Image (cartoon, grey):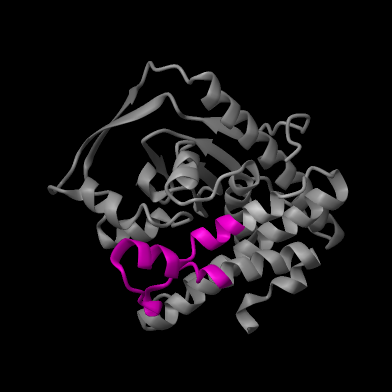
Amino acid sequence: MRWQTGRRSDNVEDQRGVGFSRKAAGGGIGTIILVLVALYFGVDPAVLTQTGLIGGSTEQTQQTPRKPTAEENQKADFVSVVLADTEDTWNAIFQEKGGRYQYPKLVLFSGMVRSACGTASAAVGPFYCPGDRKVYIDLDFYDDLKNKLGAPGDFAQAYVIAHEIGHHVQNLLGISEQVQKLRDRLPPAEYNKYQVKLELQADCFAGIWANHAKRTRNIVEPGDIDEALNAAAMIGDDRLQKRARGYVTPDSFTHGTSAQRVAWFKRGYEHGDFESCDTFSR
């Protein structure tokens, strides 16, 4: 991915120097988070708060004196460029549709972070909070993406950000709110189907970004799209569940199968428009 000469975004908040001193309300909460939540990225922490997995504990914010390494700062620089590129993409698309794209903030954190959706451990993975319109990411996740999930490459990392920005686009368009309203009206298994459609649409929107990045700015190199498709395949619900417990329960899916995630990212990339990403009518 040709990112080094790209524009840097002004919408990055670096909170890597802020940590939490935390006393859990009950024993073993941290272990539960690591085992159950680390399998998924893109989870809204508000959902976990409702189930009692996070939050409900005593917190104290403290400054952590550790200085980021050169490698960590390079990752932060990369994230800033990718964020800027998504800004350029969605700003142009919204203008074409007669609208105005409102830029989200991207928060870099380490270990734990407090958002409008609740307090989240880094084990949750990157996520978007509609309450404050911010994307949150602990850059150590990229090591897990490569070493534990088998999805190396800078474009795989960019896909992660583009997926979360896809959730921001859904928030601006009112799609997320419409799905959220179904939570209290549908049985969990039925609601999960809509949650999956929402996630698959975010994958498709990530594909739209990749399409524009290639056509208008020529930052996509040979092999980049394969990296994104591989990442989409590695984080499908079926693959993650099979890896974690040896069997799959489709009714509990929240993000879609590997095949679905690959197909919808590819669809967005090939077509490059909103109309191609209507996951809810399919």
Total label count?
0
Q: Is residue 77 left or right of residue 195?
A: right
Quadrant of the frame with the N terminus: top right
The front one of 232 and 251 is 232
Quadrant of the frame with the C terminus: bottom right
At a point 59% along the width and 45% down the height, the residue shown is: 157
Q: Is residue 45 left or right of residue 214?
A: left
At a point 45% along the width and 16% down the height, the residue shown is: 67
* Residue 123 appears anywhere in the view: yes
> Could you say where residue 193 lies in the image, as x and y percent from the top left?
48, 78
Q: Which residues are magenta?
A: 230-259
Above/below status of 223 relative to 10: below
> Could you say where residue 146 lies in the image, as x and y percent from the top left?
50, 44
> Could you say where residue 235 lies in the image, as x and y percent from the top left?
49, 60
Above/below status of 54 relative to 260: above
At a point 21% along the width and 44% down the height, the residue shown is: 57
At a point 50% along the width and 59% down the height, the residue shown is: 234
The picture quadrant where one finds residue 121 is top left
Indicate whether residue 266 is drawn in magenta: no
Indicate whether residue 255 is drawn in magenta: yes
Identify the main secondary structure in magenta.
helix
